[in-house]
């Protein structure tokens, strides 16, 4: 019997080539229509990850918090990359060696100063050899020289979630376990990974794939940790004079024909032949009759060298710094202001038009006429000066244009920010990301957090003028859980970076209580807006840290309603982590707060809702511990808590809350009946499950319906009614695929295998179900469940 025959055929999610894979490719230059303006954009030297996009499942990965799946950014143009034939040959030789040996991991480390062209070489090589690797081709910007760089543990979590499609619930918490799972998943596969901006090569060692055919192209400024890797290090010096001249001519175009070549060669040499400096110089001279000798004089005015240029001699570093300064001074005054403020963005390598507008408090529009009030005017000027680059255009999965600022330019811009403008700019940026995240998540609630959240706005919202008419910085709202989660995955890095910048700013300005309180409120707001995605995608250890930080912030500013919500979120995450004592502590405190006196802006309905949510979660914890210990007393305690929650949900007509509590109460009653051998109590529990399923259908929560079906199958199986349990497990297969829950799909196949075994189905039918369950368990990283299924498979195949 083929897979799924009992329910009418396999779900499309199991069929290769289904709708779950989509693509969106871009070239190296773009003509874009923005309303009534056409803009011709050039691809940056260090483009953001964009292109092939893999559709995702609700419990799995999305695209682009750290990188996009199965994609390499566009190769650099000749104005960015010239020469390097010897280095390219060395990289090709490593691939040849891999193919001769048929398996292994090759690591090529490209090291050199910032701006020397490491990323351009890595991308050029990757595009040349990508056809020799059949598996994922990934670009990871590890942001090693920023305050928001990921740890090896975070990088492994991203790899497991984004590439391996392992759900948050199955990703281990420790770095050692995550590394082991990553090596296991990559074993026997082929991958091409570009690890950009690595601060320490020891980071690379922690994310090495398993045995297979793998090439890692690593870019770094330092040799730190190279001794830990079996690698081929390639030190990149700035281009030779001839290559630097060719690069300048490609960048400047026809304007280069009228430039005095000897003076140009002298200026390029003075800037150390640095590719970034060459591009900025070409932009400065492009289309103008500027006196090259005057620019030569300007480059002697620098007072301090730039960060990251330690390999250049002092005079060369000062010349590059002066070139940046000269290009900056050449900008109109208002554009200088925008450039300075963009340096405050926590991810200078990737920000949108709307984020830039929020930082600068300007209209997020791009118009043909050069209006100083529109951010597009200034972004175009900065692109023309090669101080910014376009890196992504609007697509089906990204409604905004995105820009990048080179790592060398970020500290240069940030160093020019006036302290009096910092607070307002950061406040505006955090407001933008909070409003966008809130609207995206709210449009898909309550299916993200799986409960309705009480309205507990902080008693004094951050002080920022509201947007003027036509100056909104929010994006179109999505309407489904899957779309909202996919959006979150694409913007996860930005949202977490906002939380980090709020924390870092707060730690640095504790003496300024007003600003510190403002940042605490942003921590609370941003974390609350991300509660659903953090629960769905995790990693749960990081989610717990975020919710704990939000709770601490609420305590500092004395916001008890916000504290209760943060504690409830923290309790849920700790329950998912199986930290039951910690979960109960947080949930109990949340219940006490909601049942006590609260400010007048908290309505009686929201108080009841918050209390009911905390009681429901406590009931789940007691059920889970009761199952582990087979303890009737815990099930009875759970039933009491859940009945209290159910009564509160009923008084405020909360449909999903009622369905949640009814489902969980059914589990409590069933196990009490099972332990007491009371068939009537078990039947009552099953009726409660049916009622919960109807409740989920009424509110449109299809994942809740799937969970009820699997619960019902498990309970019927425990009661000995295995044929009816088999029918329930079979009925899970199609809807589980539709909502994207691989875990529920695996549970269903596992249940089918057990029921088939006990009702006397043929061994082939049992093995077929076991194979389906084992495959999905392996896919999502459910190690213990997979091992149990594998042991049964061995027995059946032997028999």
Image: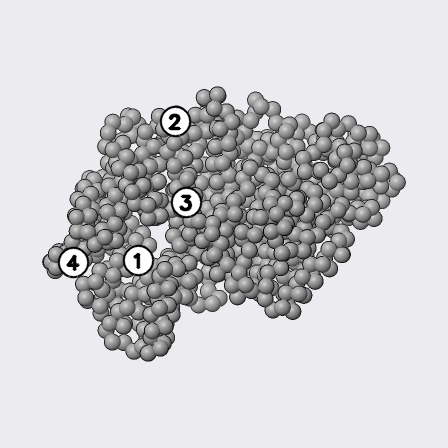
The residue pinned by badge 1 equals 706
For label 3, the SS is helix
Label 4 vs label 1, nearer the camera: 4
- Camera-side residue: 33 or 438? 438
For label 2, the SS is helix
**Residue 91 seen anywhere in this rendered image of the structure:** yes
Tell me the residue at 51%/41% (across/down).
494
The quarter of the picture where residue 520 lies is: top left
Badge 1: residue crowd in 10 Å (few <14, some 14–19, many ≥20): many
Badge 2: residue crowd in 10 Å (few <14, some 14–19, many ≥20): some
Badge 4: residue crowd in 10 Å (few <14, some 14–19, many ≥20): some
Tell me the residue at 41%/45% (across/down).
541
Tell me the residue at 28%/68% (across/down).
754
Q: Are marks 2 and 4 in contact (CB under 8 Å)?
A: no
Label 1 vs label 3, nearer the camera: 3
The residue pinned by badge 3 equals 541
Q: CA distance from mark 4 to mark 3?
A: 35 Å
Q: Earlier in the sequence, mark 2 or mark 4?
A: 2
Q: Is 300 above or below relative to 102?
A: above
Q: Earlier in the sequence, mark 1 or mark 3?
A: 3
Is residue 111 found left or right of 543 in the rendered image? right
The residue pinned by badge 4 equals 674
Q: CA distance from mark 2 to mark 4?
A: 47 Å
Q: Earlier in the sequence, mark 2 or mark 1?
A: 2
């Amino acid at each position: 019997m083929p897979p799924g025959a009992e329910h009418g055929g396999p779900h499309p999610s199991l069929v290769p080539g289904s709708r779950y894979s989509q693509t969106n490719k871009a070239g190296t230059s773009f003509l874009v229509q923005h309303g009534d303006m056409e803009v011709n954009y050039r691809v940056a030297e260090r483009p953001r990850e964009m292109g092939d996009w893999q559709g995702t499942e609700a419990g799995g990965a999305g695209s682009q918090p750290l990188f996009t799946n199965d994609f390499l950014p566009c190769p650099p143009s000749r104005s960015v990359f010239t020469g390097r034939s010897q280095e390219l040959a060395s990289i090709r030789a490593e691939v040849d060696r891999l193919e001769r040996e048929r398996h292994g991991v090759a690591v090529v480390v490209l090291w050199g100063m910032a701006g020397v062209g490491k990323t351009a070489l890595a991308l050029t090589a990757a595009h040349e050899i990508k056809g020799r690797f059949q598996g994922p081709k990934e670009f990871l910007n590890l942001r090693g020289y920023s305050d928001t760089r990921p740890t090896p543990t975070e990088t492994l979590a991203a790899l497991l979630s984004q590439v391996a499609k392992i759900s948050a619930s199955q990703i281990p918490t420790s770095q050692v376990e995550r590394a082991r799972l990553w090596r296991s998943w990559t074993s026997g596969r082929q991958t091409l990974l570009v690890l950009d901006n690595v601060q320490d090569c020891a980071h690379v060692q922690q994310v090495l794939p398993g045995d297979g055919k793998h090439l890692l192209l690593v870019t770094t400024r330092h040799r730190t940790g190279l001794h830990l890797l079996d690698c081929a290090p390639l030190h990149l010096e700035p281009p030779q004079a001839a290559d630097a001249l060719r690069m300048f001519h490609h960048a400047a175009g026809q304007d280069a024909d009228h430039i005095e070549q000897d003076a140009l060669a002298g200026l390029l040499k003075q800037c150390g032949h640095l590719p970034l400096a060459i591009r900025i110089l070409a932009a400065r001279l492009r289309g103008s009759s500027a006196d090259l000798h005057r620019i030569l004089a300007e480059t002697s005015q620098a007072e301090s060298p730039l960060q990251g240029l330690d390999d250049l001699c002092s005079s060369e570093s000062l010349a590059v710094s002066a070139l940046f300064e000269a290009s900056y001074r050449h900008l109109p005054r208002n554009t200088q202001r925008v450039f300075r403020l963009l340096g405050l963005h926590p991810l200078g390598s990737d920000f949108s038009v709307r984020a830039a507008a929020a930082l600068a408090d300007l209209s997020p529009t791009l118009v043909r006429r050069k209006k100083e009030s529109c951010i597009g005017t200034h972004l175009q000027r900065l692109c023309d000066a090669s101080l910014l680059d376009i890196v992504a255009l609007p697509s089906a999965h990204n409604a905004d244009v995105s820009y990048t600022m080179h790592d060398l330019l970020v500290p240069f811009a940030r160093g020019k920010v006036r302290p009096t403008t910092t607070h307002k700019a950061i406040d505006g940026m955090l407001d933008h990301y909070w409003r966008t995240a809130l609207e995206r998540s709210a449009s898909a609630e309550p299916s993200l957090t799986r409960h309705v959240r009480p309205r507990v706005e902080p008693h004094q919202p951050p002080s920022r003028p509201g947007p003027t008419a036509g100056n909104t910085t929010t994006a179109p709202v999505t309407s489904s859980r899957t779309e909202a989660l996919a959006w979150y995955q694409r913007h996860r890095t930005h949202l977490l970076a906002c939380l980090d910048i709020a924390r870092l700013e707060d730690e640095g300005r504790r003496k300024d209580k007003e600003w510190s309180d403002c940042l605490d409120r942003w921590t609370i707001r941003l974390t609350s807006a991300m509660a659903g995605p953090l629960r769905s995608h995790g990693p749960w250890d990081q989610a717990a840290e975020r919710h704990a930080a939000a709770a601490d912030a609420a305590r500092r500013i004395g916001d008890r309603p916000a504290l209760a919500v943060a504690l409830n979120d923290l309790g849920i995450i700790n329950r998912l982590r199986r930290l039951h004592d910690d979960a109960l502590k947080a949930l109990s405190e949340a219940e006490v707060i909601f049942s006590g006196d609260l400010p007048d802006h908290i309505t009686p309905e929201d108080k009841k809702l918050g209390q009911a949510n905390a009681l429901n979660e406590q009931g789940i914890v007691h059920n889970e511990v009761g199952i582990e210990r087979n303890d009737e007393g815990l099930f009875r305690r759970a039933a009491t808590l859940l009945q209290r929650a159910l009564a509160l949900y009923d008084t405020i007509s909360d449909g999903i809350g009622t369905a949640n509590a009814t489902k969980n109460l059914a589990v409590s009653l069933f196990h009490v009946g099972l332990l007491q051998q009371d068939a009537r109590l078990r039947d009552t529990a099953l009726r409660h499950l049916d009622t919960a399923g109807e409740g989920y259908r009424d509110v449109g929560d299809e994942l809740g319906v799937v969970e009820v079906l699997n619960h019902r199958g498990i309970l019927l199986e425990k009661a000995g009614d295995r044929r009816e349990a088999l029918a329930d497990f079979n009925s899970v297969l199609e809807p589980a695929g539709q909502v994207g829950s691989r875990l529920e799909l695996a549970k269903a196949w596992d249940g089918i295998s057990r029921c088939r075994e006990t009702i006397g189905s043929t061994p082939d039918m049992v093995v077929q179900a076991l194979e389906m369950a084992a495959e999905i368990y392996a896919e999502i990283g459910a190690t213990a469940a997979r091992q149990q299924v594998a042991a049964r498979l061995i027995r059946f195949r032997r028999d």
